[in-house]
Image (cartoon, rainbow, N blue to C red):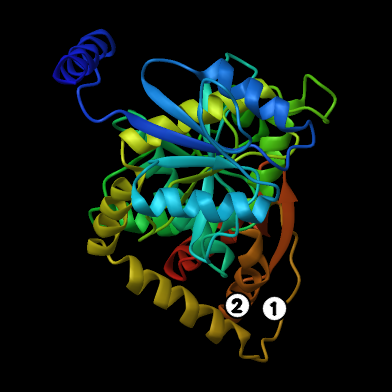
Amino acid sequence: MSKNIISEVLLEVAEAIETGNFGKKIKVGITTLGSEHGPENIIKGAKLAKNDLFDIVLIGSKVDGFESYEFETEDEAHKKMEELLDSGDISACVTMHYNFPIGVSTVGRVITPSEGREMFIATTTGTSATDRVEAMVRNTLSGIATAKAVGIENPKVGIINIEGARQTEKILIELKEKGYNFEFTESKRADGGSVMRGNDLLMGTPDVMVTDSLTGNLFMKIFSSYTTGGNYEALGYGYGPGVGENYDRKVLILSRASGSPVVAKALQYAFEVAKGDVSEKARIEYSNAEKAGLSEIFKNLKNKKQDTAKTEEIVMPEKEVVTSSIAGVDILDLEDAVKVLWKNKVYAESGMGCTGPIILVHPDKEELATKILKEENLIS
């Protein structure tokens, strides 16, 4: 008996020296039921991922060579998954469907086609907040925390050019000015800036690409299956871990269309966020953002929207020829920006330029209009 114990200890020491992992060996679970390609697709992915760094636990199918639990339904498998996570028997788990609470959304990880560069998509499923802009700010914190958990010490952030991008940028700039430490990236397009174009998406310009969850979900599907026609996701690491301000279960999401190469990468991703403790990293990011006034900023955002909802009779100034454009206004603020200028006796019209929404004014009024919009916090 003692000889067996000594043999096991020596084997563990030998593995630790070989792998560099001297702590308790991390176990990562994966549910095998629910894939559109069958349980064998998930099992094949688990076999591809098998290595000396972490152990893989199968939940749903009994397979030789793995610690495994057999179940007939996804509900039964999810109950076992939660039990194993909460007891600490597994450190993270990959699954194909999970209902996260409001405040938690997943950070995907893709391989971009231009240079084969990895990029985090923040976020891809779940809902960080019911308000779009607040959600995108929270998605930024989750994306930074996840990138740090897998070993990127100072991840650079970009915001994809969608509704809410400019408002999100303004809030992040305010947080940065008040002491929350992070770095924006610069668009590879000639006009630069931290608001990313589609080209930046393909090039993987930022480490963390901030978006809303529905758009992020679409990005994930395209990046994962653009080489296969759509029914088999062959590339990337899946939709990633659910991350929130105070969320501890490390549950990572796969699409039901994910193929075995993505399954294998998702298991690796799960190991990395477990080892790097993404939950603790998220707590730190939120704590640092809170010190810079995060809650107060969200409160002001809510109050501003309530004030905007109040109708006010504003008379349009006399029409002028408008040939100068002012960029940087979020599409959600476009109508408000025009009315603010009208209120200040500056005639303006809204438009759409190649990089997004613009305000059009007479050239002689551009400087004044820009000053007014900055004072009203409608542009940065």
Name the residue: 38% across, 41% down: 91
- Mark 1, Cα crowd under 10 Å, few <14 / some 14-19 / many 20+, is some
Please say if the residues under marks 2 and 1 sit with CB atoms less than 8 Å apart. yes
User: Is 199 drawn above or below residue 308 in the view shown?
Assistant: above
Name the residue: 35% across, 61% down: 246
First in sequence, mark 2 or 1: give its number.
Answer: 1
User: Is 7 drawn above or below residue 187 in the view shown?
Assistant: above
Say which element carries label 2. loop
Q: What residue is shown with label 2?
A: 345
Name the residue: 58% across, 13% down: 115
Q: Quadrant of the C terminus?
A: bottom left
Place of residue 310 in the rendered image (x, y in percent of width and height, measured from the top left): 61, 90
Would residue 276 be seen by someone viewing this image from the given angle?
yes
Place of residue 349 in the rendered image (x, y in percent of width and height, measured from the top left): 72, 64
- The residue under label 2 is which amino acid type? Lys
Query: From the viewer's perspective, is 289 left or right of 316?
Result: left
Query: From the viewer's perspective, is 143 left or right of 101?
Result: left
- Mark 2, Cα crowd under 10 Å, few <14 / some 14-19 / many 20+, is some
Place of residue 123 in the rendered image (x, y in percent of width and height, measured from the top left): 55, 47
Q: Quadrant of the N terminus?
A: top left
Place of residue 361 in the rendered image (x, y in percent of width and height, measured from the top left): 66, 60
Looking at the picture, tell me which residue is in the foreground, 70 or 134: 70
Judged from this view, the residue extending furthest toward the front is 1
Say which element carries label 1. loop
- Residue 317 marker: 1
User: Is 87 drawn above or below residue 195 in the view shown?
Assistant: below
Would residue 368 be seen by someone viewing this image from the given angle?
no
- The residue under label 1 is which amino acid type? Pro
The Cα–Cα distance between marks 2 and 1, rounded to whole angstroms, is 6 Å
Place residue 274 in its image quadrant: top left
Query: From the viewer's perspective, is 293 left or right of 155?
Result: left
